[in-house]
Amino acid sequence: LAVESGDYADVALANELDLARLEPGATHRATALAFGARRLRRRCDFVLRPHLSRPLPQLDPVLRAVLRVGAFEILWAGRVNAPAAVHNLVGIAGELGHKGLMQFANGVLRRLVEAAESYREPPAALLEPD
């Protein structure tokens, strides 16, 4: 979220990880997911778009961040237990937002899991990192 407001990604993530006090393994995973979602933001936005009821820029910033990380994790982060990833991300949406964000994130991410195979190889225009 801080990155969207102009902060450098590495500084913003370091600050958030300090506050979260995660175990080293979880810190590594969180870093990989955050930077992966940032690096492939256009791909994440592309695959999320068909599953949204309104444009991505109109969504709550917390929800937008959760959905982007979810898209990256489900589709491109390697071996992932997709239902567990959705569960964790919906929980994060609830911690950072409210019940409505949880419900919205749950619906979008579950639909993305169902359509995952069709998104593994994005159109050529989206193959370059942001």
Image: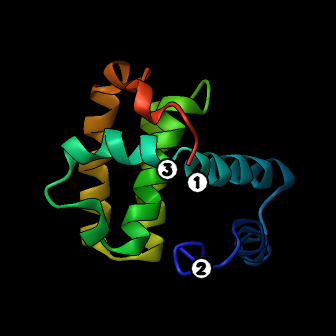
- Which residue is at the front of the view, 11 or 105? 11
Q: For marks 3 and 2, give the CA distance.
A: 15 Å
Amino acid type of disc 2?
Gly
According to the image, what is the colour scheme of the structure?
Answer: rainbow
Which residue lies at the image location 34% right of the left edge and 31% below the top edge? 113
Which residue lies at the image location 28% right of the left edge and 26% below the top edge? 115
Q: Is residue 114 left or right of residue 8?
A: left
Q: Is residue 79 left or right of residue 88?
A: right
Q: Are marks 3 and 1 in contact (CB under 8 Å)?
A: yes
Q: For marks 2 and 1, give the CA distance.
A: 13 Å
Rendering coords of residue 24 (x, y %): 86, 53
98 relative to 70, above or below: below
Q: Are marks 3 and 2 in contact (CB under 8 Å)?
A: no
Q: For marks 3 and 1, give the CA distance.
A: 5 Å
Name the quadrant containing residue 86: top left
- Which residue is at the front of the view, 89 or 70? 70
Which residue lies at the image location 13% right of the left edge and 56% below the top edge? 53
Reading the chain from its start, which is encountered first: label 2 or label 1? 2
Find residue 38 and name its label: 1
Amino acid type of disc 3?
Arg
Amino acid type of disc 1?
Arg
Find residue 6 and name its label: 2
Find residue 41 and name its label: 3
Rendering coords of residue 80 (x, y %): 56, 29
Reading the chain from its start, which is encountered first: label 3 or label 2? 2
Helix or strand or loop: what does disc 2 sit on?
Answer: loop
Whether residue 55 is visible here, answered yes or no, is yes
